[in-house]
Amino acid sequence: MTAKNIIELQGIEKRFGKFVAVSNLDLNLREGEFFSLLGPSGCGKTTALRMIAGFQEPTAGRVIIDGQDMDGIPANARPTNMVFQSYAIFPHLNVGNNVAYGLRNRGISKSEIEARVTEALEMVELGGLQARGATELSGGQRQRVALARALVMRPKVLLLDEPLSALDKKLREQMQFEMRHLQQELGITFVMVTHDQYEAMTMSDRIGVMFDGRLVQVDEPPTLYAKPCNKEIASFIGEMNFLPAQVNGDKDKGLTISTPCFGTMEIEKNPNVEQTGREIEIGIRPEQLEIAAEEPEGYDGTVQGKIRDVAFYGENVHYHVQVDGVERPIAASVPNYFHTVDHRPGDAVWLGVQSASVIDLGQNQSKPQ
Amino acid sequence: MTRPSGLAIYAFLYLVFLYLPVLFLPLFSFNSGTIVAFPIKGWTLDWYRQLGGEETLIQALMNSMIVGVVTALLATSMGLFAARAYVRYRFRGKKASEGLVMLPLVIPGIIVASSMLVLFISIGIKPSLTAVTLGHTFLALPFSVSIMKSAFDDFDPSLEEAAFDLGSSVFETFRRVTLPIVAPGIVASLLVTFTVSFDEFVLAFFLSGNQPTLPVYIWSQIRFPAKLPNTLALGSLLLLASVALLVLAEYFRRRSTKSTI
């Protein structure tokens, strides 16, 4: 499958005075994909989205949507529509008129407007609520109206600015699935801005991670999780234990490293990082660690330590294990199969890890200890 | 929480001191005697009845109405655009211009009035209702700007962006989204600026020439003791109308801040 690029951002830059909000952003979005721009607040992701929408003009670079250069084309003439963070439901109009708002700008016949509004509302499961006042809606309903109002325009790209951040946790999780289904049914490209890594991972085909105005990595969620291109991303997405390591051998796709606590290991090279020098940093996800009272068998690396803290999450139990020779306690997370916390603070335990779970993060940037 | 009762007594006396004199006006307007002093001789509505026959009064009332309506329209439309700019945009000299717009609230009226008289005569505008209207617009502007600012404060900027994004032009966005949402604020501003103009005396006295507004007319009548009860009756009606307008304005102002959650 070779989908065409619906959006091409070529060397986009946005400055506000001396402040560089977005710098040298190159990104191609495929038709029909669900793409998320993920990053902490102030990283420039919303500015990037607003440049696609046409609310902001890039200082440099080009925005191309469906093969057409958008330079000088304002937001009201672009084939994109936006779902705003605040939803921006017109308070003086009822649900039906909110959804019909954009269609009325296009000189479409009254009966067709009515039919399309009905269809759009049914799509977001608000069928029959046309006459409901905008101020009488719940948070979830407002979000659905905002979606319907944008989708009824049949945009080539739907832009979503933190669309779920105003909802409570339960509703947010439900909407994540609904929006994903909607996107797959319609086949419209969705571009979502979010600071919530779980939201991005559950909904997206691909994620672009931004820090300080730079697009750092673009990958599918599992790759992003397994092969982050630097420590910043590794710690932003999910939890990660960081350890220093020394490279003793380097061949093709593998590295032989010695670690401060798990001994010597053969690990896979991370293609997303540059290989330089002998001092590297490795990462291990907490859920990749085995924790046991006796030394576990069949692991590539094991170490003994002492439980410092236990956090019971329900579905998981988190342990912080203090290990000699490692400054920060190592986090290990195990699924809660038997509804019990097996280890208590102060208990001596063993940690085990497979070398396949050790992530190479490239040259060690932190100060030597 | 209980407050010391001393404060309550203080607050009560404070309000009595402020508003008791105002209440004498309607009280004596029903007094059948012509001397404004206790004891009240008897009750009558004659003074109110006689108002209808005063032609110069009706003319002055019309003058005030015209000036008030035009002032309200001018000040409110200027205030609407100024407030939107103050709330939405950051620009050089914003703080300074916001301060300047509010200045008429603190400049002594007599200074404004005499300097405007000099200015208007020097640029060829004779004392007239036009001159009064211009002066009143200047005075009313701070009121309309601050009312419209509070209307725009609660106005989510994404609403305008959403309308624009859905294909409206800038003008259509203003007409179909901005205007309806700030409409209660506009009504509040119209009512308040009208009241400001309607009650204003000093500027009108200097600038009205031979076309007196109602307050100027009242002042001219006060010199004739026999006319005093009529003036009191007229003043009471004005008081009632002003309070009614301001209450109405406040109602609309609150609606404007409530409508955009």
Image (cartoon, rainbow, N blue to C red):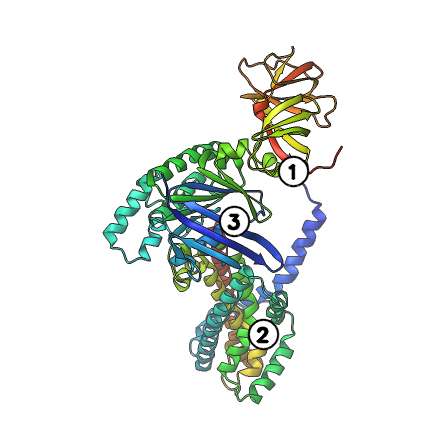
The three-letter amino acid code for the residue at tag 1 is Thr
Asked if disc 1 and disc 3 are in contact, CB closer than 8 Å, the reply is: no
Q: Residue B196, percent across and down?
A: 54, 69
Disc 3, SS: helix
Q: Is residue A319 left or right of residue B124?
A: right
Could one spot residue A227 in this view of the protein? yes
The three-letter amino acid code for the residue at tag 2 is Ile
Q: Which residue is tagged 2?
A: B35
Residue B162 vs residue A74, the one in the foreground: A74
Q: Are marks 3 and 2 on the same chain?
A: no
Q: Residue at x 44, y 51 (%)?
A: A8
Question: Tag on residue A276?
Answer: 1
Q: Residue B147, percent across and down?
A: 53, 61
Q: Which residue is tagged 3?
A: A46
Q: Residue at x 62, y 82 (%)?
A: B115
Circle 2 Cα neighbour tier, 10 Å, few/some/many (<14 / 14–19 / ≥20): some
The three-letter amino acid code for the residue at tag 3 is Thr
Nearest-to-viewer mark from 1 and 2: 1
**Residue B119 falls in image quadrant:** bottom right
Residue A120 vs residue A342, the one in the foreground: A342
Q: Residue furthest right?
A: A369
Question: How much space separates mark 1 and mark 3, taking CA atoms?
Answer: 34 Å
